[in-house]
Amino acid sequence: MSASLQSSAISSANSRLSLRDRFSGGSSSDSDVFRSISFSSNLNNLSLKSLQIPKQAHSSRISAVVRVENNLSPMEIDTSLSPRVNSVKPSKTVAITDHATALIQSGVPVIKLTVGEPDFDTPAPIAEAGINAIREGYTRYTPNAGTLEIRTAICRKLQEENGVTYTPDQILVSNGAKQAIFQAILAVCSPGDEVIIPAPYWVSYPEMARLADAKPVILPTLISENFLLDPKLLESKITEKSRLLILCSPSNPSGSVYPKHILEEIAKIVEKHPRLLVLSDEIYEHIIYAPATHTCFASLPGMWERTLTINGFSKAFAMTGWRLGYLAGPKHFVAACNKIQSQFTSGASSISQKAGLAALGLGYAGGEAVATMVKAFRERRDFLVKSFRELDGVKISEPQGAFYLFLDFSSFYGAEAKGFGIIKDSDTLCRYLLDEAQVALVPGDAFGDDNCIRISYAAALSTIQAAVERIKKAMIPLRPAVPA
Ligand SMILES: Cc1ncc(COP(=O)(O)O)c(C=O)c1O
């Protein structure tokens, strides 16, 4: 049957097309509800293949289901992306977590030890402060840099806990520490500048450097040295292009904590290079296991002027979803970051800032609420370290902070797993453990160290115990291919 259609406005869920042409030819078929018309015609640069028109439709304005076979050639829609985006690697942590979540949703009992967030609820007084903020209508924009109230409280915290003096105009509150870090990198790096990053590193540092058109310079560390940067190696890698050194202590992913004497050695090196600044990510500061202690890099002699200190509420206060972090540094740099933020997101959530204020009011280092969480993390860490020390072929550096264990399984690389194949690297090992043990972990490769895998112990002890049992069961039959 031939079909014809005259000048009609046709809308569908996705498109609104004006048909100015008269079509003829093609064929039509009927169902109870629709008349389908198939044809081939180009209009408005779209190649229309068929229409489904409700049978009751009549008149010149037809609301129809339009099936546009999108056979547009790439020349018609430019799908290219900025080279900036193409230079960035997607987050493996997110990819593996999504994969594990999909398996769980399809009924596979996967234990997920991939996430970088506390398994605890936000302490009640903090949550209450947020709720009260909403009830009291404290729901408007705040100053871009954060309220004076919270910036003053942050200054007090930095003075009392870290021995560093700042004024509120030297503080910028952001939507999470992640934003503060990215803005700091954007603010100080020119294209081609080098950002020195000890590995293993938090996944975002090198990608952020690339997004800022800077060049990440990765410095390896050794598990036998607790993944701490060797100051001599640092010294040998500094060039006139070196702009930023990123330190993270306690570290994600290794849990290492820099002892003060190593930081002092690093500070002496930094001092000799006036172009070099330090971004000191101290977000895990409170999650630390005595006798380890935290040293704020800015508190070291000569380093206040050179340091951009990052901290936040996500980890210590179990506030990942509140999105609240901050930067403290010399006014000149903070003002630059403030400018970026003002054109980017504006200030952090007013509600979260009230909650953050309550967090800072919990007492020294977060008071009892944080101490209780740290105690639980420590118990889990102790269990994990003891368990993996019993597993032949695994190398361990006992974490002194944060809630991750970064285990060296490289002695198993080259081993063959029955029904799976060769364990080649951290990626295949994690896939094997997901398949065989149904435990999701993150390959060390994502953190710049392919010898290792990361276990997050931000999960109940009973869950961790079950995971260890499964991992051991999967690993014991795989004899290390090379002696550990
Ligand atoms: C080392 C480190 N820095 C910064 C962040 C960012 O924290 P947020 O943006 O949640 O404050 C994270 C989060 O995983 C982290 O592990």
Image (spheres, helix red, strand yellow):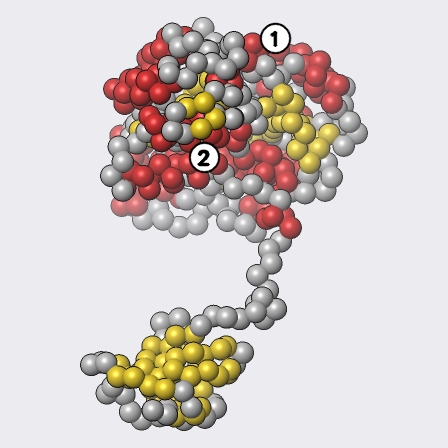
> Relative to residue 348, is residue 304 depicted above or below?
above
Q: Is residue 388 visible?
A: yes
* Residue drawn where x is 33% and y is 42% of the image: 102
Q: Which residue is mark 2?
A: 93
* Residue at the front extreme of this rendering: 419
Residue 446: image location, x then y, percent: 52, 31
How packed is label 1: few (under 14 Cα within 10 Å), some, or many (20 or more)?
Answer: few
* Residue at the left extreme of this rendering: 32
Q: Is residue 283 visible?
A: no
Residue 257: image location, x then y, percent: 51, 15
Residue 121: image location, x then y, percent: 29, 30
Q: The residue under label 2 is which amino acid type?
A: Thr
- Describe residue 332's horizontal placement relative to residue 481 as left or right: right
Q: The residue under label 1 is which amino acid type?
A: His
Q: Secondary structure at mark 2?
A: helix
- Describe residue 98's horizontal placement relative to residue 76 as left or right: left
* Residue drawn where x is 54% and y is 78% of the image: 45
Q: Which residue is mark 1?
A: 261
